[in-house]
């Protein structure tokens, strides 16, 4: 049987410490995400009243550059339709209800 050496010390910390973001970069990413969300939210607020009547609790995927959106009753179907229509562009998934949320907290 092999004996373990007693001088082994486990590594602690990040796997790639040289790839850490600075506080300014983290703040910039957060600000960009908020701007993106607000652009999508404007589109959602405009179309939500007409869609909520017939498509309550369906999923909606919004692409803010063009203002286009995809709706589907199932999350996986909505993701697939959005991938086919928008490609790899950044988009936001919401649910067609009063708040636009997809789950519970």
Image: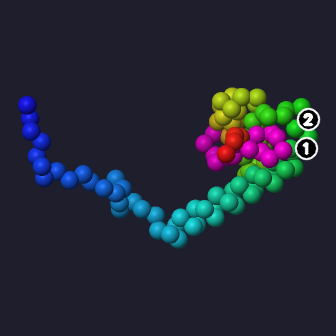
For the C terminus, give its image quadrant.
top right
Image mark for residue 102: none
Please check the rendered image and state whether residue 93 is part of the magenta-colored stretch, yes or no: yes
Examine the rendering and report whether any part of residue 89 can be seen: yes
The part of the chain drawn in magenta is 87-101
Count of all numbered marks drawn on residues in the image = 2
User: As rendered, which of 41 and 91 lies closer to the eye?
Assistant: 41
Image mark for residue 49: 1
For label 2, the crowd category at 10 Å Cα-Cα, with few meaning under 14, some 14 to 19 and many 20 or more, is: few
Q: Position of residue 47 (x, y in %)?
A: 87, 45
Alpha carbons under labels 1 and 2: distance apart: 7 Å
Residue at the spot x=57%, y=67% of the render? 27
Q: Position of residue 21 (x, y in %)?
A: 46, 64
Residues at badges 1 and 2 in contact (C-beta under 8 Å)? Answer: yes
Q: Is residue 13 above or below residue 61?
A: below
At mark 2, the secondary structure is loop
Coloration mode: rainbow
Residue at the spot x=89%, y=31% of the render? 54
Q: Is residue 42 above or below residue 68?
A: below
**Which image quadrant for residue 38?**
bottom right
Extreme residue toward the bottom, this view: 24
Residue at the spot x=53%, y=71% of the render? 24
The residue wearing badge 2 is: 53
Which secondary structure dominates the residues rendered in magenta? loop
Q: Is residue 71 above or below residue 105?
A: above
Q: Position of residue 63 (x, y in %)?
A: 72, 46
């Amino acid at each position: 049987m092999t004996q373990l050496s007693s001088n082994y010390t486990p590594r602690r910390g990040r796997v790639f410490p040289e790839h850490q973001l600075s506080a300014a970069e983290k703040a910039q990413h957060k600000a960009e995400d908020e701007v993106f969300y607000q652009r999508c939210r404007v589109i959602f607020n405009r179309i939500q009243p007409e869609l909520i009547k017939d498509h309550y609790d369906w999923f909606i995927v919004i692409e803010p550059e063009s203002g286009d959106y995809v709706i589907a009753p199932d999350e996986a179907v909505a993701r697939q339709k959005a991938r086919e229509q928008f490609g790899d562009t950044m988009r936001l998934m919401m649910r067609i209800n009063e708040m636009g949320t997809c789950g519970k907290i």
